[in-house]
């Protein structure tokens, strides 16, 4: 099993460009496939999760190929998908299974979606309920408290549009309903309790959809989309590991180029700034439909903060990393309202708390978050990824700031979202 051995690093210096945003990469393939004509995608994230989405659409009859540094998707329009020859395997990818379900709900054929052991334990009722209301027939594996798990069997139907308020602020749920809404008659409206990432709305608009957003409600009318050229910004969730590393290490100064700065994703910058990391943004601009810029980061004096409420959906993927920084910040950090972390690739509250305790952090698990009292230093130890890419990478950052050697076991999962993660580190470490 692949493992990473990390030793403490002092200065991190240099200029790096991050791989493409994972959420936007998935959507470019999905929306490109159901649009009419060619979609060209630059800076596509060639990671395991995103390759699952490519494979799924190939199985649905879409020609997708690489041409130099672009991914070419030969979209066949809203009615252009064909019945897959066998079950579609989506591995570890929650975004693939949930968003694809929305598209498959509106097809004239049935499909079966399979998942790896981690994704097979992740909740699907959140998308099944609204998709059934729209008319789809979906079978799943029943679980406790009427929860539903993959594999999913989706019998597509002619869909009706719905007005739906989600209980959770989840971009995956919102996007599944919107994508299904493309196949419904009339107006689909989705409201959410707090704003989740809005890449689907932005991309649908760019591809010509009749879509509008007012506060936390999105309205969409069905209609054909047209293939476009998409340039994907660097993934801010991947950038976050380097922001944290530089923020924790003396004498560090890093420039991260062309990072996605969509306001529904930049909460991590606000949180890091509040915790004392010095961050400056230069060269802000918009390409296609997503804002971006270069982020310059330097170490500051770190302090604990409270993170709760409506900021949580915007920082959900970065909370494991915030737990690492909080472990070394002065004072107390309180994380609340983050129960969703328990149903990610692993239970990220328990995986991070148990790992950080091994390194000597003062951290306690709560029902929906953690209580962390910063310590002066962590010490090296042997920790586990639990098969979760973000847990693995967060523990690399912890290891860089621990005395002695830290071994992170089972790190092949990093390829899920960030192939080349350790090579990028090597480039900037002294
Ligand atoms: C994602 C949405 C988030 C996030 C995930 C990617 C997306 O999940 O955690 O990594 O691409 O829509 P939820 O919508 O379940 O919060």
Image: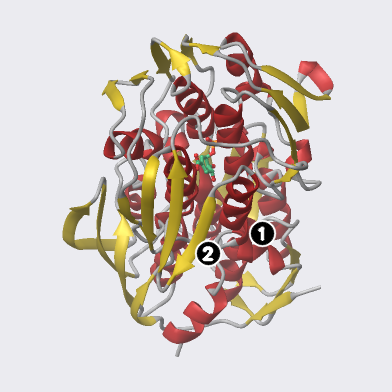
Q: Nearer the viewer, residue 369 or 158?
A: 158
Q: How is the image coloured?
A: secondary structure
Q: Nearer the viewer, residue 30 or 234?
A: 30
* Left or right of residue 84: residue 371: left
Residue 136 shows in this picture: yes
**Residue found 41% across the figure and 14% down from its top:** 188
Q: Nearer the viewer, residue 397 or 230?
A: 230
Q: Nearer the viewer, residue 266 or 108?
A: 108
In the image, residue 97 sits, relative to residue 190, either above or below, namely: below
* Left or right of residue 380: residue 225: left
Q: Secondary structure at mark 2?
A: loop
Residue of label 1: 356
In the image, residue 308 sits, relative to residue 70, either above or below, namely: above
In the image, residue 57 sits, relative to residue 103, either above or below, namely: below
* Mark 1 vs 2, N-terminal side: 2
Q: Quadrant of residue 20?
A: bottom left
Label 1 neighbourhood size at 10 Å, few (<14), some (14-19), many (20+)? many
Label 2 neighbourhood size at 10 Å, few (<14), some (14-19), many (20+)? some
Q: Of circles 1 and 2, which is in front?
A: 2
Coordinates of residue 144 in the picture (x, y in percent): 83, 21
Q: Secondary structure at mark 1?
A: helix
Coordinates of residue 259 in the picture (x, y in percent): 32, 60
Residue of label 2: 46
The alpha-carbon separation of the residues under discs 1 and 2 comes to 30 Å
**Residue found 56% across the figure and 51% down from its top:** 373
Count the numbered circles shown: 2
Outermost residue, bottom side: 430
The quarter of the picture where the C terminus appears is bottom left
* Left or right of residue 404: residue 309: left
Q: Quadrant of residue 258?
A: bottom left
């Amino acid at each position: 099993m692949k493992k990473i051995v990390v030793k403490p690093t002092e200065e991190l210096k240099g200029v790096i460009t991050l791989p493409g945003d994972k959420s936007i990469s998935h959507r470019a393939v999905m929306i490109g496939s159901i649009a009419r004509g060619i979609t060209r995608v630059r800076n596509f994230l060639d990671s395991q999760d995103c390759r699952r989405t490519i494979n799924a659409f190939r199985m649905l009859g879409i020609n997708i190929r690489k041409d130099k540094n672009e991914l070419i998707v030969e979209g066949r329009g809203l009615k252009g998908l064909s019945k897959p020859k066998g079950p579609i395997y989506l591995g570890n990818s929650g975004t693939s299974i949930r968003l694809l379900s929305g598209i498959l709900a509106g097809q004239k054929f049935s499909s079966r979606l399979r998942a790896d052991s981690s994704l097979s334990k992740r909740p699907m009722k959140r998308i099944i309920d609204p998709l059934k209301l729209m008319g789809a027939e979906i079978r799943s594996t029943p679980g406790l408290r009427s929860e539903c798990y993959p594999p999913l069997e989706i019998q597509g139907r002619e869909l009706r549009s719905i007005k739906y308020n989600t209980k959770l602020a989840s971009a995956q749920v919102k996007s599944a309903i919107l994508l299904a809404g493309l196949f419904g008659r009339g107006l689909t409206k989705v409201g959410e309790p707090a704003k989740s990432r809005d890449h689907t709305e932005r991309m649908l608009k760019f591809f010509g959809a009749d879509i509008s957003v007012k506060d936390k409600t999105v309205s969409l009318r069905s209609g054909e989309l047209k293939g476009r050229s998409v340039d994907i910004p660097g993934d801010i969730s991947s950038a976050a590991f380097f922001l944290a590393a530089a923020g924790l290490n003396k004498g560090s100064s890093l420039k991260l180029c062309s990072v996605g700065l969509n306001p529904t994703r930049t909460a991590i910058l606000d949180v890091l700034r509040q915790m004392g990391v010095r961050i400056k943004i230069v060269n802000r601009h918009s390409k296609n439909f997503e804002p971006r810029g270069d982020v310059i980061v330097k170490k500051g004096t770190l302090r604990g903060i409270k993170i709760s409420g409506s900021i949580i959906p915007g920082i959900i993927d970065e909370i494991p990393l915030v737990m690492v920084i909080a472990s070394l910040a002065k004072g107390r950090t309180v994380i609340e309202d983050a129960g969703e972390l328990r149903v990610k690739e692993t239970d990220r509250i328990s995986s991070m708390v148990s790992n950080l305790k091994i390194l000597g952090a003062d951290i306690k698990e709560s029902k929906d978050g953690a209580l962390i009292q910063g310590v002066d230093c962590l010490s090296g130890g042997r920790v586990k990824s639990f098969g979760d890419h973000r847990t693995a990478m967060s523990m690399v950052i912890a290891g860089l700031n621990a005395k002695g050697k830290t071994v992170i076991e089972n790190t092949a999962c990093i390829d899920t979202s960030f192939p080349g993660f350790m090579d990028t580190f090597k480039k900037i470490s002294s």
